Image: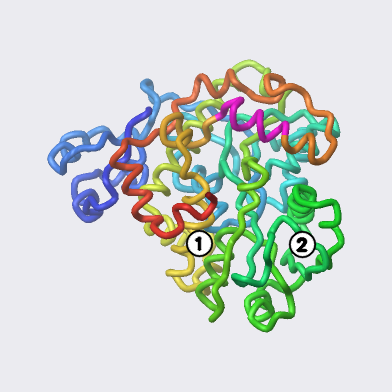
């Protein structure tokens, strides 16, 4: 475990020629040491595909529940199971399934509903669940910066922290969307809540911004890229993160179940697999888009491939571009980041949250072998993300 991915420029055809049929190329890339083509051929004889030294696999009859449908910004959890990363790092589960909102996922995990024991959910509903007494532990961050922000025509809004009297469109009535809007408006002046917040079909937002029917759209980084490409006006993205630093998503587990014998090691293997799957995506985003369209969510074949590639850059990769991911690993867990996010959310929502030490499953995190990035790999990611690198600054 802990091996680095090869350069995504490496020839897939060469790998397919040297690897045995029993070893999938994607699994090999995710766990192999960066090497030359000759080196790759030399190590291809080991077809175990396991990231654990002994090749043992710990199995649990559980569901790992995501927060929403499979998309470019919500793919790692499903891919880790579907594409073999979990077994590659010594863990086996019954299923990784899509979710129906972060609040629902948090409740399922926090109340140990059926066999649901691992989840991925938005940070604010997780905090609300903990405040309500649900038994949830955080095992790692996922998208470590909030993706939400205000999209508006340049010059149309003088101060994005003062929105009194403005017509604001949201595309979803999900609790997280509204909750984070309340946080954003609370940051500015007390009259910020004196605005017209309305649910508008997402496809109508770009035209409504152009016509002036709405003053701003409250949405996410990947949506901003779509709107920017389909309108003739100069759009601005004002990130919530600039005013209210919080993580976007976290990985969670049930606290009581985690304490049962062997489960901490099992979850640490799941976390390791998730981290290395995320690195594969970060290093091979266009191949991941093809996997997503061909295998994980064929409905996305109706969306132009280039739109999905841009969504991968803005909805996943740009959110991950922080030093903690590079140096501590994707799915890092730190009091600096998560503890500060807890403090911010607790103050904004008047929640009575426990201390960070009671919420963070540090024992799991310390056992995991997260995927970190070399300077060259990190530069490659930044270069690929390009103009969207500083989207959240």
Q: Residue at x 65, y 44 (%)?
A: 65
Image coordinates of residue 125 in percent, x first then y, are: 75, 43
Disc 1 element: helix
Q: Is residue 305 left or right of residue 156?
A: left
Q: Which residue is mark 2?
A: 163
Are there few (<14), some (14-19), or many (20+) residues within 10 Å of tag 1?
Answer: many
Residue with the most extreme front position: 158
Residue with the most extreme bottom position: 211
Give 36 or 187, whichever is nearer the viewer.
187
Give 226 or 302, whichever is nearer the viewer.
226
Image coordinates of residue 208 in percent, x first then y, are: 69, 79
Disc 2 element: loop
Q: Is residue 137 left or right of residue 198?
A: left
Q: Give residue 217's quadrant in the image.
A: bottom right
Q: Give residue 195's quadrant in the image.
A: bottom right
| Chosen colour scheme | rainbow
User: Quarter holding the N terminus?
Assistant: top left
Q: Is residue 290 above or below residue 94?
A: below
Mark 2 in CB contact with mark 1 (< 8 angstroms)? no
- Gap in Å between the C-alphas at discs 2 and 1? 27 Å
Give 277 or 18, whichever is nearer the viewer.
277
Residue with the most extreme left position: 38
Q: Which residue is mark 1?
A: 311
Give 68 or 41, whichever is nearer the viewer.
68
The span shown in magenta is 333-343
Q: Residue at x 60, y 32 (%)?
A: 337
Image coordinates of residue 313 in percent, x first then y, are: 46, 57
């Amino acid at each position: 475990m802990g091996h680095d991915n090869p350069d995504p420029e490496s020839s897939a055809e060469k790998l397919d020629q040297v690897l045995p049929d029993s070893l999938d190329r994607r699994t090999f890339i995710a766990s192999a040491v960066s090497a030359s083509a000759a080196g790759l051929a030399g190590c291809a004889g080991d077809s175990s595909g396991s990231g654990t030294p002994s090749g043992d696999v710990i199995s649990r009859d559980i569901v790992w529940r995501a927060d929403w449908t499979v998309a470019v910004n919500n793919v790692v959890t499903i891919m880790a199971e579907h594409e073999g990363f979990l077994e590659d790092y010594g863990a086996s589960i019954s299923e990784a399934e899509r979710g129906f909102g972060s609040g629902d996922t948090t409740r399922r995990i926090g109340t140990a509903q059926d066999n649901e024991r691992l989840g991925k959910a938005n940070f604010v509903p997780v905090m609300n669940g903990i405040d309500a007494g649900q038994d949830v532990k955080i095992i790692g961050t996922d998208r470590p910066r909030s993706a939400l922000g205000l999209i508006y025509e340049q010059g149309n809004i003088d101060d994005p922290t003062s929105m009194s009297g403005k017509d604001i469109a949201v595309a979803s009535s999900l609790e997280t969307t509204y909750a984070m809007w309340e946080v954003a408006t609370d940051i500015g002046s007390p009259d910020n809540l004196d605005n017209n917040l309305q649910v508008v079909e997402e496809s109508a937002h770009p035209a409504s911004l152009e016509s002036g029917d709405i003053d701003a759209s409250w949405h996410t980084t990947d949506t901003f890229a779509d709107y920017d490409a389909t309108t003739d006006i100069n759009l601005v993205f004002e990130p919530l993160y600039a005013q209210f630093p919080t993580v976007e998503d976290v990985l969670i587990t049930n606290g009581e179940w985690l304490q049962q014998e062997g489960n901490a090691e099992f979850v640490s293997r799941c976390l390791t697999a998730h981290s290395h799957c995320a690195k594969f995506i970060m290093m091979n985003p266009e191949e991941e888009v093809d996997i997503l369209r061909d295998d994980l969510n064929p409905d996305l074949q109706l969306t132009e491939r280039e739109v999905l590639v841009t969504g991968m850059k803005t909805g996943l990769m740009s959110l991950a571009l922080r030093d903690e991911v590079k140096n501590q690993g994707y799915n890092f867990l730190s009091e600096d980041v998560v503890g500060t996010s807890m403090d911010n959310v607790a103050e904004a929502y008047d929640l009575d949250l426990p201390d960070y030490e009671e919420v963070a499953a540090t024992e799991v995190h310390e056992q995991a072998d997260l995927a970190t990035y070399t300077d060259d790999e990190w530069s490659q990611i930044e270069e690929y993300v390009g103009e969207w690198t500083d989207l959240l600054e």
